Image (cartoon, grey):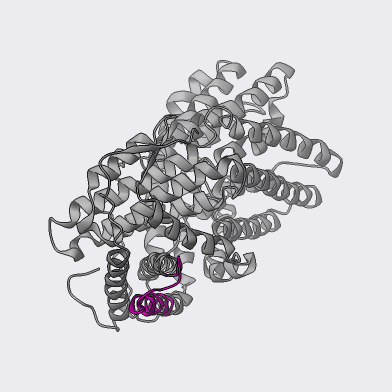
Amino acid sequence: MSSATPTSGTSPVRRLSLTGVLRLRRPSEIWFKPALSSVAAVAPPNLLLLALGRLDLAMYTMAGSLCALYAHNRPYAARARTLAWVVLGMIGGLAVALVTASLTRDAVVLVTVGALLAAVQKALCDATRVGPPGNVVLTFISSAALFVPQSLGQIPGHLALAAAAGVWAWLVGMAPAPVRPHGPERRATAQALNAAAAYAAAHGTGADEDHAPARAAGYAAVQAAWQTLLALPTTGARAATRHALERLVVRAEVALAAPADTDPERLRAWAHALRGAGRIPRTGDAPADTDELLGVDAELAARPVPLWRRVGPLAPIAARTALGCALAGYASLALGIGRPYWALVTAAALYQANLTLTWSRAVQRVVGNLAGVLLFAAIAPLAHLGQALLVLCCLALNFGAEALITRNYWLGSVCVTPMALLVTEFAGYQATGDLMTERAVDTVVGALVGFLAAVVVTNRRAGNRVEQAVTAADRARERAARLLAEPAPAPGALEAARRGLAVALTDLRATADGAAGEWWGRALPQERVVLAERSGHRTLAEAVRRQAVRPDRGAGTRTEDVRP
């Protein structure tokens, strides 16, 4: 929130700045997991094809192998389902591309189909919140397959290769489960506790408005933790661990609502105890925990939002993707570039939640790809010494891309670009200078045309969604306030209302931030947003005090008798 209350007519325009776009962040805590999984999934199929002398088929096996990049933040039961759907989605997109390639060689038709596939992949990945790397890998495979000469008789065999590699990728993704079966949910809970501790520690150092970003980050981490825990089974051996972690997430939520009553070091101690395979810390307030978990049960009983309702609001982003990818591909064709799918994929990789984020990604993409082209020039002589070295270079770049991309997207792109160029040489070596020129031109064309499409296709629904989010937050606050006015609300009712209000406020902040990044649309109700947030957070604090739940209650960090 701003320290000055803006009026309801505040323009949603934000400057398209270069400040901080290329700044490096701290690496993800599990940066090595997707990096190692990628190598483990890609290496065996590629090495087998190398031994058989059929590296030209590597594109099909890589389609399945790259599915191992997904779902590393999900509990293993949910990961199994997500990876299965990703593999099916990858094979489905590949099938459409291969059939199209076998029926026509008209480049305009191929680009059009690739753009439509990219839009569908973008909408589905965003609606299902599949997580990074999102639609980009799916679009890369399907777009490249469109421009590989194909016959209908070859398609079943190529799809079988992709499916076999996809099964292997699924096994790689699930491999850590026997060793650390509760690792993802423990990490998500620890991140929520640390984020809440950071906000509580900063709360007393200045005006409350100064710490709004830290509070928003804390609520986002808490919501991510709840999404992780709600994906776990409610019965069986895992239920005890789940309930122990739920109590810790509740403590993080309470800390965000009442930071002045919070001991940040206690939250950090709980988060530290969740590392490794030790026992799960206890909060030491069983009666309050019982009421709070009734709020969790209420959320579990709620019906999930149907997929079609989640896809609907994404129509502007899907339209941007379709138009931008198509125009980028057409522009590449007009320039005589032999691989227009590079421009298409560049455009597909740009589109984020709003125009401001799309601009940042465009800058990162161009910088990373151009630096990657220079890296390719240095690597290519070594890779051309033999096909074995070609495969090994690709594996090393694969690891580097996943290890670095969490620092900043452009840094990961420095490795992705030469890897993609080397993959094109699996079927035969090509002129290094020509590949570098085509990739550089397609990068600039794809980024420029793709961003212009984002400017043209405006998201006029963003303002309406902010209005709806404000209304939902007001209703959630009123419900909590009514229960606070009652002398003895029903068990769990106040906690359910408090959690509902926390969710509504988190959604409101995310929706307002997304809408503020658009450049052409209705003025946002900024004053209502600020007032809804302020009153909502005051009500959250009152609910915490009413229940007399203090995060610092207890003499020390005790542990729940639950083993991972």
Residue 453 seen by the camera? yes
Foreground residue among 306 and 417:
306
Foreground residue among 12 and 417:
12
Foreground residue among 524 and 518:
524
Foreground residue among 175 and 517:
175
Q: Is 490 part of what is drawn in magenta?
A: yes
Find the residue positioned furthest to the right.
153
Q: Is residue 321 above or below residue 233?
A: below
Prevailing SS of the magenta stretch: helix
Position in image of residue 454 (x %, y %): 46, 65
Position in image of residue 358 (x %, y %): 42, 59
Position in image of residue 244 (x %, y %): 45, 45
Residue 449 seen by the camera? no
- The reply, left or right, for residue 48 in relation to residue 251 is right
Q: Which residues are magenta?
A: 470-493
Position in image of residue 284 (x %, y %): 34, 46
Q: Is 4 part of what is drawn in magenta?
A: no
Q: Indicate the quadrant where residue 473 lies.
A: bottom left
Quadrant in the picture for the N terminus: bottom left
Number of marks in the rendered image = 0
Q: Indicate the quadrant where residue 46 lies.
A: top right
- The reply, left or right, for residue 340 in relation to residue 269 is right
Q: Is residue 328 above or below residue 46?
A: below
- The reply, left or right, for residue 112 in relation to residue 553 is right
Residue drawn 71% across the image and 31% down it: 57
Residue drawn 81% across the image and 51% down it: 103
